[in-house]
Amino acid sequence: MPITLRQATHGDLPEMKELYVGTITTVCTNDYTPEQVAIWASSAQKAQRWIDLIDHQLVLIAQKDNNIVGFCSLDKNVYIDFMYVHKDYQHQGIAKTLLLAIEDKARNTGTSTITSDISKTARPFFERKGYKVIKEQINIRQGIEIINYKMSKDINPE
Ligand SMILES: CC(C)(COP(=O)(O)OP(=O)(O)OC[C@H]1O[C@@H](n2cnc3c(N)ncnc32)[C@H](O)[C@@H]1OP(=O)(O)O)[C@@H](O)C(=O)NCCC(=O)NCCS
């Protein structure tokens, strides 16, 4: 079955959160310590944050065989907030499909530069897709340092 893209609804949130936790606690463990992974994954419990995500961002779901296999979000047409692919569906071109779609949406609103805060795990993927590191960031969450990168891409090069 091919991958289809659609907009997320509130009803997708339980499956999206399960995917989010599943991916962070497996795919990201080469790049972050168990403590960092636990703090990161615990964001799935911030109920209002997820409701706001659906209500205020463009959230695209990649679906295959009736399962959610990835999702990404675009905030205010300029910022990629989420990009997660299911742990069992890595390296199948799902993130690439989502990214192309979300960049198109941004471009169509006149956006010329997209930014994001990218994990160590996702950095090579985004670099491959033309994003450049602006700076390394040390975030303190629950007293623990978690490193990520501010990255950006000009999506409307002259
Ligand atoms: C990063 C992530 C979204 C990539 O998803 P994916 O569906 O496996 O990526 P794709 O299969 O679409 O890969 C697209 C391209 O990126 C490359 N790529 C993907 N992951 C890569 C990696 N870890 N290192 C190097 N290249 C990578 C692929 O080789 C492919 O290249 P191509 O287009 O030239 O063939 C996924 O690994 C993930 O969910 N990571 C954990 C969650 C995360 O950290 N999200 C970001 C939060 S800021």
Image (spheres, helix red, strand yellow):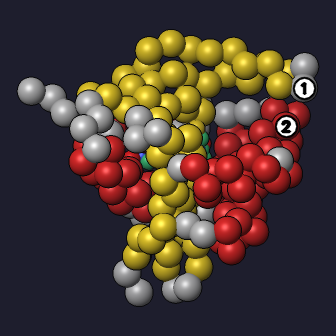
Residue lying furthest left: 158
Quarter of the image with the N terminus is: bottom left
Q: Give the side of residue 148 with respect to residue 116, left or right.
A: right
Q: Is residue 104 among what the camera can see?
A: yes
- For residue 106, the mark is none
Judge whether 76 appears above or below 85 on screen. Answer: above
Q: Nearer the viewer, residue 110 or 157?
A: 110
Quarter of the image for residue 98 reads bottom left
Q: Give the side of residue 43 with respect to residue 129, left or right.
A: right
Rendered residue at 90%/26% (across/down)? 142
How far is the residue under mark 2 from the one under mark 1?
7 Å
Judge whether 28 appears above or below 60 on screen. Answer: above
Q: Amino acid at mark 1?
A: Gln
Q: Which residue is mark 2?
A: 39
Percent x, y of residue 80: 48, 40
Label 1 secondary element: loop
Rendered residue at 69%/15% (across/down)? 138
Circle 2 residues within 10 Å: few <14, some 14–19, many ≥20: some
Do residues under tags 2 and 1 come within 8 Å of each other at their CB atoms? yes
- For residue 142, the mark is 1
Judge whether 138 appears above or below 17 on screen. Answer: above
Ranked by sequence position, the earlier of labels 2 and 1 is 2
Circle 1 residues within 10 Å: few <14, some 14–19, many ≥20: few
Q: Nearer the viewer, residue 78 or 25?
A: 78
Q: Amino acid at mark 2?
A: Ile
Rendered residue at 60%/63% (across/down)? 86
Label 2 secondary element: helix
